Image: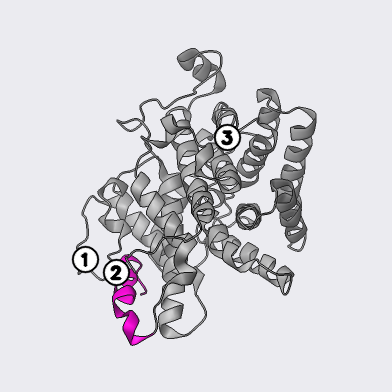
Amino acid sequence: MPLPRTPPDSRLQSRFRGCLLGGAVGDALGAPVEFLDLEEIVRAYGEHGIRDYAPAYGKLGAITDDTQMTLFTAEAMLSAHLAAALRSHEPDFFRSAADSYARWLMTQENSRLLTSADPKASWLLQQKKLFSRRAPGTTCLSALQASRGRVTRATNDSKGCGGVMRMAPVGMYFAHFLSGERHRDHLYSYIFATASDLAAITHGHPSGSLSAGAFALMVSLILGGAPLTEAIHAAKDELRKHPSYKETLAAIEKAESLAKSRPRERGALRELGKGFVAEEALAMGIYCALSARDFEDAIILAVNHGGDSDSTGSITGNLLGAANGIEVIPARWLAPVELRPTIEALADDLAAFPDWRLRSQADAEERAFYAGRYPVG
């Protein structure tokens, strides 16, 4: 069997790639206008706003910290899975994420590429283009600098969107386990809690972590075949089980209401906020995904506002890419997006990891391959 493994189901591969690449193209389209208000966007790009990639960070199709951290979340989930398989214990996603986010922090603090012999090395750290600061969130930086790889929760009171915007891979990982009705509620709670815990590594406010949990559960259910409306409903049910849920729930329900009563309106989108905080970014992504005509229409709506355009574009792209597959992403956006081969490789691994053969002596080559790609600590 050639390595790396790819999903045997082409539709599954399309939807997993669509989820990660959909987020990346939304991120890249929003990157040039992230710090502009709507009036400035209209002056620069015309009445309809930005509709195609414009230069950001010296190139077209450049991703930001949103996609960077999403890729390291994917690494964390797969590293935890690999370590658990090799050592016969339950996956420790929290510890794995603390290690992966520490590696992301290294890409932001220096330009030294690690060698494969370095104990902190990983396949992602061999991707030179990741060693670039793309307006990383100050909360993510300060929280990770304070912890320096220790397995701990943030002590701040931030609910910035840096927790929610990186959580699609959590939903992607757990989508494989959704078949059947047995223990469904327990699994929903586990998906929600895992994403909430990973967001809490950098964001200490409940809305910062609860929004992440709701988003990951939505992604997982959509990849499992649920319509977006059903995935949102299930996420709200899970959300209500947690203290301090009301702020996030109110934002989601406002997005649903506006999507029905005033679809595809910039004014309605503006009523949901600017997306700099978690529940607003999630609500804006939901509104755009629910109300737009198609993927392109949704992403254009999601980035043309005076707020955190790359994050709202990324969340919208994750949701619709998961629902409809890579085929719905316009080719003119897909072709030039930065790090596309790396993003596709991680999406394929998230789609195919249940088929990895890791335990028997005959599987030594496969075990060594994935251990070289995903650090197990």
Q: Is residue 373 magenta?
A: yes
Q: Are marks 3 and 2 in contact (CB under 8 Å)?
A: no
Amino acid on which disc 3 is placed: Phe
Examine the rendering and report whether any part of residue 151 can be seen: no
Residue 214 lies, with reference to residue 184, above or below; the image says above
Real-space Cα separation, disc 3 to disc 2, in angstroms? 36 Å
Work out which quarter of the rendered image holds the N terminus and state it: bottom left
Disc 1 to disc 2: CB gap under 8 Å: yes
Magenta span of residues: 360-377
- The amino acid at mark 2 is Gly
- Residue 217, located in which quarter of the rendered image? bottom right
Q: Earlier in the sequence, mark 1 or mark 3?
A: 1
Determine whether the residue tagged by mark 3 lies in a helix, strand or loop: helix
Magenta highlight: main SS: helix
Q: Nearer the viewer, mark 1 or mark 3?
A: 3
Residue 331 at x, y = what percent? 44, 33
Report the colour scheme.
one colour
- Mark 1: which amino acid? Ser
Taking the spot 72% from the left edge, 28% from the top edge, the residue there is: 263
320 and 47: which is toward the camera: 320
Residue that appears at 22% across and 68% down: 118
Q: Which residue is mark 2?
A: 372
Residue occupying the point 57% across, 34% down: 295
- Disc 3 marks which residue? 295
**Residue annotated with mark 1:** 116
In the image, taking residue 336 as reference, residue 205 lies left or right, namely right
- Residue 246 to residue 51: above or below: below
Q: Would you place residue 110 above or below residue 135 in this image? A: below
Residue 313 in percent (x, y) is at 54, 37
Q: Residues within 10 Å of mark 1 (few under 14, many from 20)?
A: some
In percent of width and height, residue 110 lies at: 25, 51
